[in-house]
Image: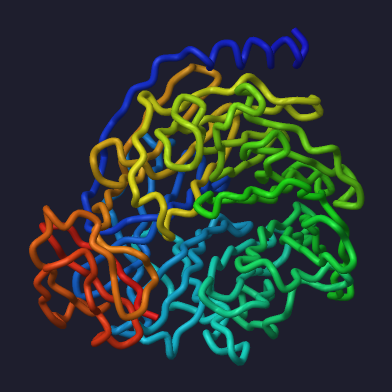
Amino acid sequence: MNRLILFLLFWVSIKSFAQQNVNISEGSVFDGEPYILYNDKEPGQIVVAWIGYKFNNALVIKYRFSNDYGTTWSETKFIPHVQSDYTSADPSMAIDKNGRVYFCYIDHSQDLDSGGVYVVYTDDGGNTLSTPYKAIDAYDVPGEFPVDRPWIAIDTVGTGIYITVKPVYWDELPNRPYYIKGNYETWTWGALKVLDGGGFEVGNYIANPAASPCISSSGRFFAVYPSYLPSTYIYPRYVLAKLEANDSISYSAVCDVSSPVTDTLAKRGTNLCVDPIDSCHLAFIFEQEIYGDADVFYTESNDCGNTWTEPVRVNDDEQGNGKMQDLAWGAFNEKGDFVAVWRDRRNGTDGYQSDFDIYCAFKIKDSTGFSENVKINDETLPFDTILNKNGNDFLSVTYRSDTAYVVWGDVRTGSLNIFFTKVNAKNLSNQTQILATDQLPVFYPNPTKNYLYVNNIAAVTSVKIYNAVGKFVAEKEIKSKVLDISFLKKGIYFFEAEGKMQKVVVK
């Protein structure tokens, strides 16, 4: 039976399988932004990391290991802060050629006056962690705070470790993406360098120019970032940066974005992946509004990014139906097949603030298109205003053999939960598990300065305020929809009201 027939049978089968939900939540105060990894050197080992709150430790990076393909999980553990008054965010992970698991994350003071991007590793399934190694200082770039979205990628041929970052989202424009290269055996680092250039600069209009990096099986570093230079090119576009043998960077356009996503609430995720069996086969997934609403698109290159295919629409709901798709992510398996995963509103209403589902679609290597879309949650997921906020900006997927392993956040239980699902095309099994939970927000906007609005004044009578290390700061009575917080210094705080805890960033 040829691969095309197998592929058709594959997606017809998985479209209709019954899904079973299993709750394995640890039930913490604050959790978000999960990242998932599969360890090829330890078959069956899956790692999930996320931002979580720990009393007297502010926000920390939490993680869990599974050694049986996600059937059972270790207890929840956390990465200690470099300093006791620090707070953490934005985990990403990578594996080296020996199967060592690396965690990359932000750790900084609540006053935003020190800290940076750190890396730790574990050799024993997360039971012990290495000393944290500082890769980037928060003030490596004068006038900026270049620590946001620190994505890590590791060379599985040599000993190179790469991290891409951008300035924090409240920094004034223009912002540019950066990268740094290190050695994970000597733990030495080069200088933090600007990633964009060569006539493909980010420009003065893009506030969050996050770069998506990857390393090929030959050890080559690639990254895609957004660019908009209207004086030289009419459309915004995505640009590929690739590191050459002499450590210079060459650039090429990936695709135009002639119809950008206009809804400012949309989580416009992008993800660059490289085929593990073909070091010049790259895939890139992103969103745009060619048909009048946000759809997920895929493009690929078979010549190391010199040329790219015409982008294809991945979600197969009716074109132009007003239903927004966002939060896209993708991954290759070891055979060069690809899976795309995203948040989908085809079963909800128009726009961002709609009930939604999590969908996936598969693409067999060398095929021209994707399978019919498959819903991987077992009930339509309700919208809540917590999804308007920062801190829930991506989901994550890894793919091995015929199984995709996915993590995302939704509010089906009444609070924001992190769910895990494995979609196995071979035996048609699926399990969805809650890895962690997060309470719903009461106060907005966030970040803020001088004041906050109260979401439901009828249900909130007072609020207790704690600093980032859990020290009590003040208690305020709620008398109106506007809460004066001008007495608070710049930093990170936790507001407790009616049994719910919410992180608030004061600028």
Where 473 falls versus 14 (above or below)? below
Residue 314 image offset from top left, x and y in percent: 67, 31
Q: Is residue 18 visible?
A: yes
Residue at the image point whose x is 29% and y is 49% from the top: 436
Between 63 and 272, the one lying in front of the other is: 272
Say how many tags the image has.
0
Residue at the image point whose x is 59% and y is 80% from the top: 172
Where 405 falls versus 204 (above or below)? above
Q: Is 417 situated left or right of 138 in this image? A: left
Query: Outermost residue, front direction?
Result: 480
Q: Locate residue 139: give its quadrant.
A: bottom right
Residue 366 image offset from top left, x and y in percent: 81, 28
Where 212 falls versus 107 (above or below)? above
Residue at the image point whose x is 73% and y is 10% from the top: 5
Q: Locate residue 212: give its quadrant.
A: bottom right
Q: Is residue 333 visible?
A: no
Residue 379 image offset from top left, x and y in percent: 35, 25
Q: Name the colour scheme.
A: rainbow
Between 179 and 327, the one lying in front of the other is: 327
**Dividing the image into 4 quarters, which one contains the N terminus?**
top right
Residue 402 image offset from top left, x and y in percent: 58, 27
Q: Is 126 situated left or right of 298 in this image? A: left
**Dividing the image into 4 quarters, which one contains the C terminus?**
bottom left
Residue at the image point whose x is 88% and y is 61% from the top: 233
Q: Is 400 situated left or right of 376 in this image? A: right
Q: Locate residue 294: give its quadrant.
A: top right
Between 219 and 256, the one lying in front of the other is: 256
Between 186 and 107, the one lying in front of the other is: 107
